[in-house]
Amino acid sequence: MAEIRPKLERLFAGWRPGDIPTKNIATVPARTKPEVYLLDRPGAIQTTIIAGNVAPPKANPDEPAIETMGAVLGSDFGSRINMNLREDKHWSYGAFSFIRDARGPRPFLAVAPVQTDKTKESVLELQKELRGIVGERPIEPDELERAKASLTLTLPGSWETMGAVAVSIGEIVAFGLDDRYFATYADRIRAQTPASVTEAAAHTVRPGQLVWVIVGDRARIEPALRDLDLGEFHLVDADGKPVPSP
């Protein structure tokens, strides 16, 4: 540091702060009821099922527990959602869940591309997994240990290049994280318990308030989807504009 600081100060001495655009990072309330948006793709051999809700911002004290929960539910290959729809049922080549990082409220999403004739059944299985993670099917000790290992043992490989290190530093700045966020990350993941992860799931996954976006062959899947009574039903086009019912 003693050697590099004078060089940096000399090189960047002429830099001046510019205008920073105002960001609209508003608090987004959770929905009070579920809704379904169906987009028709005639002849599609797959249906893409997306279910989502608003989750807490990245910079929150429960983030290690939320990430651990995500590894159990859907972000790892061996997660519940993928093992169910891909390995057990063979209805999908891969199904998963994730949370898109943001400063403000961010989307939690579960995504499952499935064969068309198993659309209804896949929605039911996805519902079962989302309900299970919040308490109907408590996280088991072996699942928790696998999630911890996945999140911590892969860390060294995450910073093999200077570019990768820069990305992590960028996350600290962009999301307002503590400067030692990654230095303490592994310890905080290893400290998680089934109770802490289940509690985090309750703040992140809201099975009764989901927005469903389903893309597929409407003629083949709409009647069965309506039978599920997932929520208020909307027909939309590829731009999200309403499509009148026949």
Image (cartoon, rainbow, N blue to C red):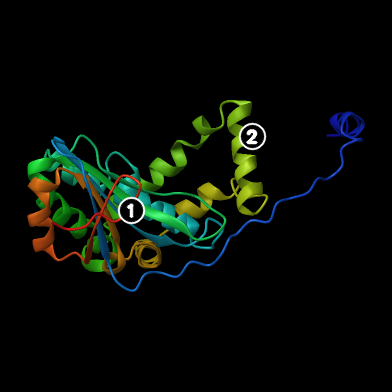
Is 53 on the left-hand or right-hand side of 29? left
| Mark 1–mark 2 distance (CA, rounded to whole Å) | 40 Å
Disc 2 residue type (three-letter): Ala
When the figure is inspected, residue 243 is found, relative to residue 182, above or below; the finding is below
Q: Quadrant of the C terminus?
A: bottom left
Please tell me which residue is depicted at 58% across the width and 31% down the height of the picture.
164
Quadrant in which residue 215 is drawn: top left
Residue 241 percent coordinates (x, y): 33, 53
Return the residue nearer the eye: 53 or 140: 53
Return the residue nearer the eye: 163 or 43: 43
Residue 38 percent coordinates (x, y): 22, 52
- Mark 1 falls on what kind of element? loop
Tag on residue 241?
Answer: 1
Labels 1 & 2 near each other (Cβ < 8 A)? no
Which residue has dot 2 on it?
Answer: 166
Residue 2 percent coordinates (x, y): 88, 33
Is 223 on the left-hand or right-hand side of 95? left
Q: Nearer the viewer, mark 1 or mark 2?
A: 1
Is 35 on the left-hand or right-hand side of 157? left
